[in-house]
Image: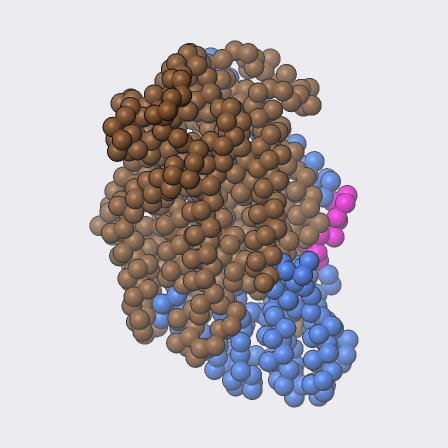
Amino acid sequence: MDFAWTVLVLVALVALAWRFLGAYMVAVYETRVHFLGFVERPIYRLIGTAPDREQTWKRYATSLLVFSGVFLLVDYLIFRVQGSLLLDPQHLGAVPPALSWNTAVSFVTNTNWQNYAGETTMSYFSQMGALIVQQFVSAAVGIAVAIALVRGFARKGSPTIGNFWVDTVRGCLYLLLPVAFVFGIVFVGQGAVQTLAGPAHVTDALNGVTQTIPRGPAGFMETIKELGTNGGGFFNANGADPFENPTGLTNLLSIALILCIPVALTYVFGRMVGALRQGVAVLAAMTIIFGAWTAFTTYAEHQPNPAVAAAGVVHQPTGNMEGKEVRFGDTQSALYDVASTQTSTGSVDGSNDSYNPMGGFGLLTGMMLGEVSPGGVGSGLYTILLFAILAVFIGGLMIGRTPEYLGKKIQAREVKLAGLGILVMPITVLVLTGIAVSIHAGRAGPLNAGPHGFTEILYAFTSQTNNNGSAFAGLTGNHAFYNVTGGIAMLMGRFAVIVPTLALAGTLAAKKVVPESAGTFRTDNTMFVGLLIAVILIVGGLTFFPAVALGPIVEQLSHGRFFGVSLAHLAAVAHVVAADLPGGIAHWSAVP
Amino acid sequence: MLTYLRRSLLLALVLTVVLGFVYGLVGTGVAQALFPFQANGSITKNGSAIIGQNWNGYSTSKILDPQWFHGRPDADDPLVANGKPGFSGAANLGPRSKVLRTEVHALVIAWHRVGVDPTTDLVTTSGSGLDPDITPQDALVQVPMVAKATGIPPTRLRSLIAHETHGPELGFLGSSVVNVLQLNEALARLR
């Protein structure tokens, strides 16, 4: 019953966001909102641009690539010299080069994969001056690309698709900043920390234990982390940490913040192309996939954990609680983690690695569908529109007509660009996973042995290439191999999709509109929604089924079998984390 | 190309100042002004009400102190003493992990030794390793242990637990929970 109420309230919140945040976003990107003009105008003067100076797709893409590259370098340098900067009360010192590279790429690409523990690696300066900044900027860049593609559909015979600088600045100032700020206050009121005072030392008079409690400016990072579908938390435990996500209410608000912009973008799409039904059709496909995956994953997590049952606790009425927080419970944790994996957010409010085999399957395959249900901010919409182009192409083949989408003829160039944008992700994931399992450095990563260890590797590359950042966190990614390959995966998944998308926006904007006729293939009815879902599921299934069969499916089918810890992993990390393993390294090595 | 580079660099600097420092510092100021207790970590005299109570070395080798209620075991003894900043995080053991089975089994035995038939929460680690809460059921199964060690009648302890039970928030968000630190502080007042 509680879960039904949660879903109901969530649906209501997201529906409001769809209608009203969506309408507001249309106004923002059509430059009709000006209340922060006193900040906005000086920025344009400084960088020498203006809202009416439009760019071709090539200039738009070049601006985006150069801007992201420059920011990547700036962030890399901040991590490298954080020890000499202000706001480092714990004296954490410089971040090593490979980790700095991985982290800079991770935040610039909106991935927020974290091969580090925030509270013991990143100074307050790095968290605020690099990580939080990217949580705004990378989100705004993603939305800008989606808006550019929507303009491509909406415009007729236009050589330009908007101004990258203006779209990015407006997204940050008018959309992300106010919402994140207001909810930041709510999160702190609920118990999230927001202080620059450094760790607290407290002695518990009852049991005599002295605690060192890490603190920091985490509360306001939490809201932009969710709103921008970033996912990178201040603390290692991310959304499970009571200082980031203190109550059931913040958990629900987190889910709503994660979903609101990706969902509202379908309203923006419908409005800007002049037919709201088109946006509703896309939203329907997203919602059906999301609903099915939520039901499956929550059900799986409500089942007992097999290892806990084998240890003697057979009766587990509260579901699989290993790696979950009591204040959320099994189903609301699972709901959060599904929302986070299907939006390329990647924040967690429990340990995904300890999910039941089919629960982990739900999270992993949610990402493998290309992050379209509803996907990340911007990336969700532009990726599902690539699938929509593929769907009208396939539909056109079936009935023997040149396909059209929103009045634009879909020809060889459009289908090639859409196909390229869709195939980059599976190719990158499968090739890198193949390399990782073939070499020693890759096999040393997973903590768990057996099929679960394989899933940890597959999950890592799926997550990074989809710019998600969610992890089966048993994998130790902070080694040269995973830092470097992960960086490549994230760059491919981001920019090798964005460039074809912008090219598509350019060619579509330049096209004339074909008048609708009796033979026009409708893209705003149930038939099209079904076709779109089928294309997404078939592409995902055909590319990933063999890999998934070796991971969670085998694990689910291994009734009564249990697997140890990866010995290669123990050897590789012994010198780093021996102190962090429960019972010390000797205990772990001796496990039968 | 130079124009792109110059624009990018200038915009990067401006956005770093506005979105990083202005946002973070103004946010900290507002948070400290409106909610100073929460913003600083909800620190009470015995710990943080948000992070909860830490049992140093709540591990399989130690004997559980029967005079107090216990929360969930830590994945790696986070927030240990010695002044080293703590480390949050889960154990990340898979659902078919031999290690998980062994660890849980050892905890079951440790609980049986003090006369408690543990619930799932008492033998599994949480997502943060810092879970401050347990369910009322998790607390109730510990009543015979605490009653025997302290001499407080079980009915008193049960009403104490009922009194310390909060939520679910708004009637449906999350579970009914008992904050272990607050429960033990209430227990200390009884003794």
The quarter of the rendered structure image containing the N terminus of chain A is bottom right
Direction left: furthest residue:
A438
Residue A169 visible (yes or no): no
Q: How is the image coloured?
A: by chain
* Residue found 71% across the figure and 70% down from its top: B164
Vertical placement of residue A419 versus B126, above or below: above
**Front residue of A537 and B162:** A537
Q: Quadrant of residue A473?
A: bottom left
The chain shown in blue is which?
B
The quarter of the rendered structure image containing the C terminus of chain A is bottom left
The chain shown in brown is which?
A
Direction front: furthest residue:
A518
* Residue found 51% across the figure and 72% down from its top: A317
Q: Is residue A241 left or right of residue A519?
A: right
Residue A190 visible (yes or no): yes
Which residues make up the magenta segment?
Answer: B32-43
Q: Estimate the x, y position of residue A304 in percent, counting from the top left.
A: 44, 70
Vertical placement of residue A294 versus A431, above or below: below
**Front residue of B111 and A526:** A526
Q: Estimate the x, y position of residue A308 in percent, counting from the top left.
A: 43, 72
Q: Estimate the x, y position of residue A209 in percent, counting from the top left.
A: 63, 68
Q: Estimate the x, y position of residue A25 in percent, counting from the top left.
A: 58, 29
Specify whether residue B39 is painted magenta. yes
Q: Is residue A98 left or right of residue B146?
A: left
Vertical placement of residue A495 versus A314, above or below: above
* Residue found 39% across the figure and 46% down from its top: A367
* Residue found 29% across the figure and 68% down from its top: A558
Q: Is residue A414 left or right of residue A36?
A: left
